[in-house]
Image: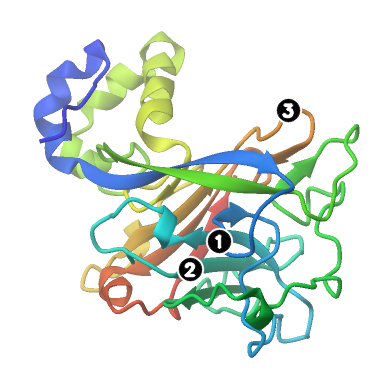
Amino acid sequence: MVDLDLPTSLERFRSKLEPTIKSYIDIQTRFTREATLWQSKFAGFPYLPKNLEYPTTPEGEYLYLLAQINFDEVPHLAGFPTTGILQFYIAKDGMYGLDFENPTRQSKFRVLYFPELDLNENNLVTDFDFLPTLWDYDKDLIPFYVFSSYTPHRNDCFTLSFTLKAAPISSCDYQFEKLIGNEIWDVFQANNRALYNEYQERFVSGHRLGGYPNFTQDDFRKNLPENEEPYVLLFQIDFDPGELEKISIEWGDIGVGNFWIKASALKNLDFSGVLYNWDC
């Protein structure tokens, strides 16, 4: 049993919160210009064998790498791959590649998985001069904010480190009230929502693989048919101040991006039906 470190004012809800605890992978970032092609990263250039075409939209516009996870660098998390590279690409447009009408349609976003890696650079794409520069100062096109005082370099990216953690259900999860009850909201609302903010900071916010999600709006899963297999959180990339006065990660107005998958598809390493969502 994980020792749940609860704020004192929430101790009375321990018996309800503890059964909801899930393991997840916490992700921390480090801003850099030095990253290998196969290293875990946000932004930057991807691991891509020469026999594959770089992903594009149906109109032929290049997508760009949002995130790359090398599972050889990640602590084991039940149900997730133990090896290989998982990549998330999105379009550089006003919706960050999201199709609200069909959020599983991988036209302006793409999820690629490479179960076996070839680390021989002779077999990999190493020259990405064909790609337009990702970094600019228009935060409406990318979920990154480039400070006006900083001149970005093409190689700028965020390398990642991973820690296995566990947390109870997030307060924005659609099952929160069903499992925990309504009384906890009275406690959250007291003292100008200070306890709510502490719960968010301790258990909900941040980049992660698996576990419970963060939302700034509503959990879309509450509107899905009850007989449909639910989506579970695959990957979350949250607001991140990044490197001071250089580049930060921002989804609109301090929002969050999520990628979702059905557990049966994850078990089969089938990422063709991933659901992409972000809100702010």
Compare marks 3 and 1 and give the one earlier in the sequence.
1
Q: Position of residue 249 (x, y in %)?
A: 66, 43
Q: Nearer the viewer, residue 174 or 2?
A: 2
Marks 3 and 2, Cα distance to the nearest angstrom? 29 Å
**Residue 121 found in image quarter:** bottom right
**Residue 244 badge:** 3
Compare marks 1 and 2 and give the one earlier in the sequence.
1
**Residue 183 found in image quarter:** top left
Q: Position of residue 152 (x, y in %)?
A: 85, 45
Compare marks 3 and 2 and give the one earlier in the sequence.
2
For residue 228, side relative to residue 219 (left or right):
left
Marks 3 and 1, Cα distance to the nearest angstrom? 23 Å
For residue 134, side relative to residue 229 (left or right):
right
For residue 245, side relative to residue 35 (left or right):
right
**Residue at 63% from the left image edge and 76% from the top image edge:** 48
Secondary structure of the residue carrying tag 3 is loop
Q: Position of residue 201 (x, y in %)?
A: 43, 27
For residue 113, side relative to residue 5 (left or right):
right
Q: Is residue 98 visible?
A: no
- The residue where tag 2 is placed is 85
Q: Indicate which label's residue lies in the foreground, 3 or 2.
A: 2
**Residue at 60% from the left image edge and 37% from the top image edge:** 240
Q: Position of residue 124 (x, y in %)?
A: 66, 78
